[in-house]
Image (cartoon, rainbow, N blue to C red):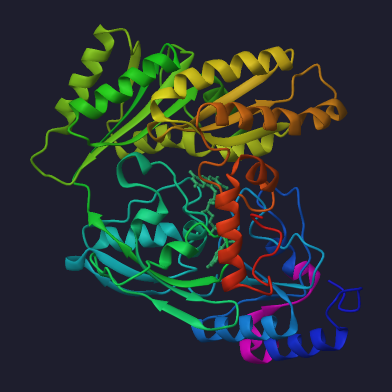
Amino acid sequence: MNVDAPSSVPASAIRDAIAALKQVLGDKGWLEEPTDTLKYRTDWRGGSVGEALLVARPDSTAQVSDVVRICHGAGIAVTAQGGNTGLVLGSIPTEPVPSVVVSLERMTRIRSLDADNFALVAEAGCVIQTLQQAAAEVGRLYPLSLASEGSSTVGGTLSTNAGGNNTIKFGNAREQVLGLEVVLPDGTVFDGLNTLRKNNTGYDLKHLFIGAEGTLGIITAAAMRLMPGPKKRETAMLSVPNPEAAQVLLSRARELSGDTVIAFELMPRRCIDLAMEYIEGIVDPIATPSPWYVLMEMATSSEIDDLRAKLEAIFGEAMERELVTDGVIAESETQRAQIWRIREEQAEAGRRAGSAISCDVSVPVSRVAEFLARAKEMCERELEGVVLNTFGHMGDGNIHYGIRKPDAMSVEAWAQRKGDMSDKISALCAEFGGSFSAEHGIGGLKRDDFRRYTPQSRVDLMQAIKAAIDPDGVMNPGKIF
Ligand SMILES: Cc1cc2nc3c(=O)[nH]c(=O)nc-3n(C[C@H](O)[C@H](O)[C@H](O)COP(=O)(O)OP(=O)(O)OC[C@H]3O[C@@H](n4cnc5c(N)ncnc54)[C@H](O)[C@@H]3O)c2cc1C
């Protein structure tokens, strides 16, 4: 960004602030050349590029505090960034104001891990996969699991309250948090970093920063709860005739399994075809094609729990009731990984295929099949020749509703209809008492839906909180509101 471009902040103040930032960050702690900062300014889908005076790469909470204090003093906006895998334009600057990106990529330490307290404390830039591995090494489980876990971070997943594959059993990112350390907009460090299970001492302020998408402060570290590590795991891909059958199967599997179902993903045939077309090495798991599939995973931390027997009982009953027509149970870790890859590569396959919108919506778990039927009817009425790819975490009512450009439609005509179709899915979702953003957040992309579907009393309260904590609006402007 050009320091001399028109702005309410005097160019001299910006120059002084940049010099001060470079000084506190040291040589390895900042990037300024546009070619060096490009990847930090480009969103994951590659469609938007923001502007930034500097990318700050602090390596300690003290440095984050200094950076935020300097920016605040100069009226420079601050956008926190973790793995930059967010899908709603939250992690790049989007407003025409002088901005600095604060990347947490150098703050990756696990500060402590107490297996007997079932807890660890990690810095915000720690990648989720690293956390999972550290927990596994001491026989524990960090249960948040999402396709972006090789890049997404503690700070990013908490700031978006990420969901993922295991929400059905372990809840979203919020449920994993015991305590937080946060740098507030004036540089003050909020110290809420404890690993207690019980601590009823007034307002539980950590929750303000979870799901806040960097609009209230920068999370620098988090205390997370851990679970006993899984001793047994069973993964199956099941052919189901339709989402209605999958819905019945879901309830029954949870009942019969003693609540050991940790993932329940619904996919149409299109998911397998798309993955096979755009991603190397995808294996079609079941010889006879089916219109729909369920990827179900069960896990237990008990050595004496016979998961295989439970899965076979569920499978057998479902076949008898014609809820399931075929299926495969993973017999090795390789086969398990092959099955999961089909699901996990959907975002990447969709990105490569292009010309599609994906709405991240949720409805009550019991109404997913009904919602899918109504949405399909609506899409087919609105767009002749529409191709749908509607998959997702059925176990927690979250569907990624993908609508592809009909083959016969021009790119220009599609560009005009995209927003409208997305609005119609959000409106239908609202009719079902659902959410227009199940797990990705609001960022800069879904602000219209936020205004449209959020009760005014809630917006007012959120704005009051924003004004109290960040009165000058320096934290990630243009996001959420
Ligand atoms: C292939 C793929 C699969 C995905 N699957 C899922 C899924 O299953 N479930 C799901 O919920 N999401 C999913 N996502 C979306 C994304 O991975 C999540 O939103 C994730 O939580 C973002 O983490 P991140 O570290 O990349 O954050 P970023 O993208 O860097 O940032 C996301 C938001 O958090 C803010 N932020 C980042 N770090 C901090 C911090 N330290 N303090 C304050 N604010 C901060 C940013 O300003 C931004 O608003 C997927 C994305 C991809 C690309």
Relative to 381, 245 lies left or right: left
Image quarter in which the N terminus is found = bottom right
Q: What residue is drawn where x is 74% and y is 87%?
A: 17
- Residue 427 lies, with reference to residue 453, above or below; the image says above
Q: Quadrant of ligand 1?
A: bottom right
**Taken as a whole, is the magenta stretch helix, strand or loop?**
helix
Question: Does the segment drawn in magenta span residue 449?
Answer: no
Q: Position of residue 164 (x, y in %)?
A: 44, 44
Q: What residue is drawn where x is 62% and y is 86%?
A: 25
Image quarter in which the C terminus is found = bottom right
Front-most of 32 and 339? 32
Relative to 323, 271 lies left or right: right
Q: Position of residue 255 (x, y in %)?
A: 21, 27
Q: What residue is drawn where x is 35% and y is 38%?
A: 334
Front-most of 118 and 186? 186
Give the extent of the magenta segment. 22-36
Q: Position of residue 365 (x, y in %)?
A: 40, 29
Q: Position of residue 202 (x, y in %)?
A: 33, 70
Question: Does the segment drawn in magenta span residue 31?
Answer: yes
As drawn, the residue found furthest toward the front would be 457
Front-most of 454 and 405? 454
Answer with the quarter of the image where residue 142 lies.
Answer: bottom left
